[in-house]
Image: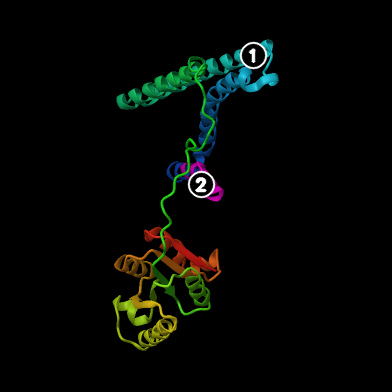
Amino acid sequence: MRISPTLRRIITRLLAIIPAVLVILIAGESKVGSLLIFSQVILSMQLAFAVIPLIHFVSDKKKMGKFVIKPYVQVLAWLVAVIIAVLNIKLVFEEISSWIIKYDVWWLTVLLIMGAIGMVTLLIMTLMYPILHKKKSIELDVHAPFEDLKFDEPKLFNKIVIALDYSTSDTKAVQYALSISQPDSHFILVHIVESAGVKYTGESTDDLESRQDLDRLKKYEQFFLDRHFKVDFELGYNNRVVSITRICEQYQADLLIVGSHGHRGIKDFIFGETVNKLRHAVKIPVFIAQ
């Protein structure tokens, strides 16, 4: 699974820890020893499923080349695998028999027998599958088959939304916007008001902060008008991601430019991580000016 190594470690550790904690909470600390023994029984049952494919692999001359194991080593390896499998089947039979006698519940008996049959079936499949599919070709490419590259005609960014937060990052956002602009580019300037009143009502309250934000947005508008660009501006309220996404859809924008604060990690948690949420919410390219 191609996921973050940190996330993978968290998932696998939780899969190991949570069942143990639940058993301890439900059954008490006195059952920890029994739980440990049971876990070792399960691990021993898994040995055959690891050993058999390993023997198949290292015995295959096409895969191993000069490192393929000798015939006498193959015989010894299969002997060990058979011993492990037989002992495990015996162990499973004894454990299931004792549980059936001890609890004497029909549905548990059926469940245990079905589980045992399933394990034996899987063990037979593990043994036979490589033999039956030995001549089958193996695809080693992890990517899709390569095809001739075909591209559509490049699309110009005519309608460009610039998200402004009135910080130093606005300067770079505007500079990049101008660098990719065309004479007929249409800029839509956006700022999200997040005053206390707006957070309470969820819409414009015409408070002092909203008025100041509007005045500053008009100054940005004049900056683009002086350079003979078509420009509109929009004030959004409270939720940055929802408001910016709505405005992009409203104007059918071709590109969204947002500034980057340059913080990461714990600061993203404290101040919010708008950029990452926006790139999932909007259906157009997102340019991060940093």
Question: Disc 2 marks which amino acid?
Answer: Ile
Residue 81, horizontal then vertical, whole percent = 58, 17
Q: Is residue 9 above or below residue 279?
A: above
Q: Residue at x 55, y 65 (%)?
A: 264
Which quarter of the image is occupied by the C terminus? bottom right
Reading the chain from its start, which is encountered first: label 2 or label 1?
Answer: 2
Residue identifier under label 1: 74
Question: Which residue appears at 53% of the width and 74% of the height?
Answer: 172
Q: Gap between marks 2 and 1, in whole Å? A: 37 Å
Say if mark 2 contacts mark 1, CB within 8 Å. Answer: no
According to the image, label 2 marks what residue?
3
Residue 140 in view of the camera: yes
Badge 1 crowding class, 10 Å Cα cut-off, few under 14, some 14 to 19, many 20 or more, is: some
Q: Which image quarter: residue 228?
A: bottom left
Q: How busy is the neighbourhood of tag 2: few (under 14 within 10 Å), some, or many (20 plus)?
A: few
Q: Which residues are magenta?
A: 1-19
Colour logic:
rainbow
Amino acid tagged 1: Gln
Most prominent secondary structure in the magenta stretch?
Answer: helix
**For residue 93, side relative to residue 264 (left or right):** left
Magenta-colored stretch includes residue 3: yes
Residue toward you, 65 or 155 = 155
Please state which of residues 247 and 24 is positioned toward the viewer in this rendering.
Answer: 247
**Residue 193 visible in the displayed image:** no
Q: Determine whether the residue tagged by mark 2 lies in a helix, strand or loop.
A: loop
Mark 1 lies on a secondary structure that is: helix
Q: Nearer the viewer, residue 278 or 160?
A: 160
